[in-house]
Image (cartoon, helix red, strand yellow):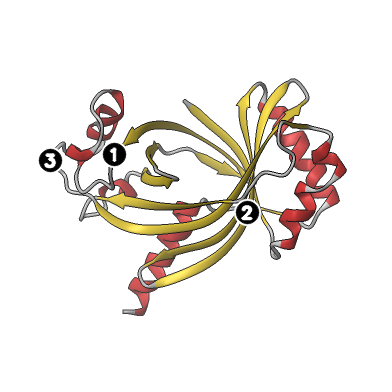
Amino acid sequence: MLEQELKFTVADAAVLDEVLGSSLIGSLVEGDTDPPAERFHAVYYDTPDSHLEVLRCSLRARREGMRFRAALKLPGTLVDGLSQREEYEADIDRWPASVADLPGGEFRRRVEELIPADSSLVPRIEVDMLRRVVHLSAGSSQVELVLDEGEIRAGGRQAALCEIELELMRGDVADVLELGAELERAFPLRRSLLSKHAIGISLLGEAHDAD
């Protein structure tokens, strides 16, 4: 499926509360207006020779409560905060150590189109976040508002991150862009230039340069 989302970073986590509690968001929310913060831990994997990084792809496993979920993201674009890329997801039953640990079917087939089926997988980047999610009706579209606060770690280095994501679930990406522009006018937001995975890659580069 095509993942389309607009990302913003904020300097202060208090802005996340301000956005969530705003009348703008309140007028669009469907369902829970005060979602609980859920902790999630994600690991980005690659082959020992970093083949996925070379291909500008990412393979992520994430624990969501008692559930494990894997995601493969193909090269896409990130222009002025708007990320568009093909994404494939599947349930898994444990942290993977090799391609063979991934579920069969389309998900593994997509991975094996990129790296050999007998490849081992090594963890390279870790992400720990407190996440709140609300569902919005914006224009003619359904949009997921995600508020993240946490840390990215890679190569013995770490980076704090407070981020807002507006992901198109159904409809027209123009509604996401319009809502994002309204939020920018109301709050001190900065459009993200890097994904969480790209921030982790940057940390790895810093660690390598320091060696």
Q: CA distance from mark 2 to mark 3?
A: 36 Å
Binning the other alpha carbons within 10 Å of mark 1 as few (below 14), some (14 to 19) or many (20 upward) gives: some
Q: Is residue 77 left or right of residue 179?
A: left
Q: SS of the residue at dot 1?
A: loop
Front residue of 31/170: it is 31
In the rendered image, the quadrant that contains the C terminus is: bottom left
Q: CA distance from mark 3 to mark 1?
A: 19 Å
Q: Is residue 38 above or below residue 206?
A: above
Q: What residue lies at 37% left-to-right and 65% top-to-bottom?
A: 204
Q: Which mark is residue 118?
A: 3
Q: CA distance from mark 2 to mark 1?
A: 28 Å
Asked if the residue under mark 1 is in contact with the one under mark 3, i.e. CB atoms within 8 Å, the reply is no
Residue 157 in the image: x percent, y percent? 42, 72
- For disc 1, the marked residue is 93
**Nearer to us: label 2 or label 1:** 1
Residue 79 in the image: x percent, y percent? 60, 43
Q: Which mark is residue 163?
A: 2
Residue 160 in the image: x percent, y percent? 55, 66
Binning the other alpha carbons within 10 Å of mark 3 as few (below 14), some (14 to 19) or many (20 upward) gives: few
Q: SS of the residue at dot 3?
A: loop
Q: What residue lies at 29% left-to-right and 23% top-to-bottom?
A: 106
Q: Is residue 14 left or right of residue 193?
A: right
